[in-house]
Image (cartoon, rainbow, N blue to C red):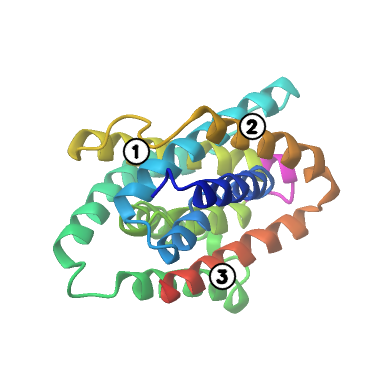
Amino acid sequence: LLMDFHFFDLLIILTVIFSTLQTIAGVGILVIGTPILLLMDMKMLDLMSFLLPLSIFNSLLNITFLKFRNHKLTIDKNTKKYFFLLCLPAIFFGLFFLNQFDEYINLNILVSIVIWLSLSLPIIYKNIYNLKILKKILIFLTGFVHGITNSGGSLLSLLLINVVNKKIDLARIQIIFFYLFLALFQYVIIVIFTKIEFLENLGFINFLAILFGVILGNCIVNKFSFYEIKKIIQILAFISSIFLISS
């Protein structure tokens, strides 16, 4: 399928778009790419082996770019602790849940409901993301949801964009940093426990497309305010939930 010429061209175009979005908002390649490729009849394992390395490469490039611009990688210590203690192990639970209950439960609808709740909670109570217990629950759900559908980045970005102090670069650094480990950990699990080969179905042109998207995204990101980027993240999360239901 990946060798089909027209499909390959479309994938390159989509990769540039997803990479640009992820550079601006911190998420995009997995959050939007996964449901779109599912609608294009690509199997979940195939699209994971395709998208995860590209997401990892995008995050690494953006961290390098931000450090080159002398931005300190200021990561909240409590969030980092919860992330490594709760989020990463939860990916195992998500993958196990997917394997055991995929035939019995519509997991896409379940994840969409979780995303909608995450979008609506701040409307009910503006400071709800600052509640420690909710932060822990959302960080665990991020890993669990990511193990099921590749869409855990929606929850992660919604959480982080609501707890930073209205600074674009700080928000992007937080999201990019944690999203890197989210994708990396999931990809390592898949490579170890499945038969896919490392960087299977990927070519040099795919990584060039990611690089182009990173350059383009960093050239235009300063044209957006904090609130505009926050809206972009919310819209991406909502679109992801709609695509999940459609697929």
Looking at the rendered image, the quarter that the C terminus falls into is bottom left
Q: Which residue is mark 3?
A: 238
Nearer the N terminus, badge 1 or badge 2? 1
Q: Which mark sits nearer the N-terminus, 3 or 1?
A: 1
Whether 196 is among the magenta residues is: no
- For label 3, the SS is helix
Q: Residue furthest front?
A: 5
Q: Left or right: where does residue 25 sit relative to residue 241?
A: right
Contact flag, marks 3 and 1 (Cβ < 8 Å):
no
Q: Is residue 106 left or right of residue 146?
A: left
Q: Would residue 165 be counted in the magenta stretch?
A: yes
Residue at position x 70%, y 63% in the image: 231
Label 3: few (<14), some (14–19) or many (≥20) C-alpha neighbours in 10 Å: some
Q: Amino acid at mark 2?
A: Leu
Q: Give, as a three-letter code, the residue at label 1.
A: Tyr
Asked if residue 182 shows in the view, the reply is no
- Secondary element type, mark 1: helix
Mark 2: few/some/many CA within 10 Å (<14, 14-19, 20+): many
Depth-wise, is mark 1 or mark 2 nearer the camera? Answer: 2
How far apart marks 1 and 2 lie (CA) works out to 20 Å
Question: Mark 2 = which residue?
Answer: 211
Circle 3: residue type: Phe
Rendering coords of residue 241 (x, y %)? 48, 70
The secondary element bearing badge 2 is classed as: helix
Q: Which mark is residue 34?
A: none
**Span highlighted in magenta in the image:** 164-170
Labelled disc at residue 187: 1
> Residue 49: x and y, percent?
36, 42
> Which of the marked residues, 2 or 3, is nearer the chain's N terminus?
2
Q: Quadrant of residue 196?
A: top left
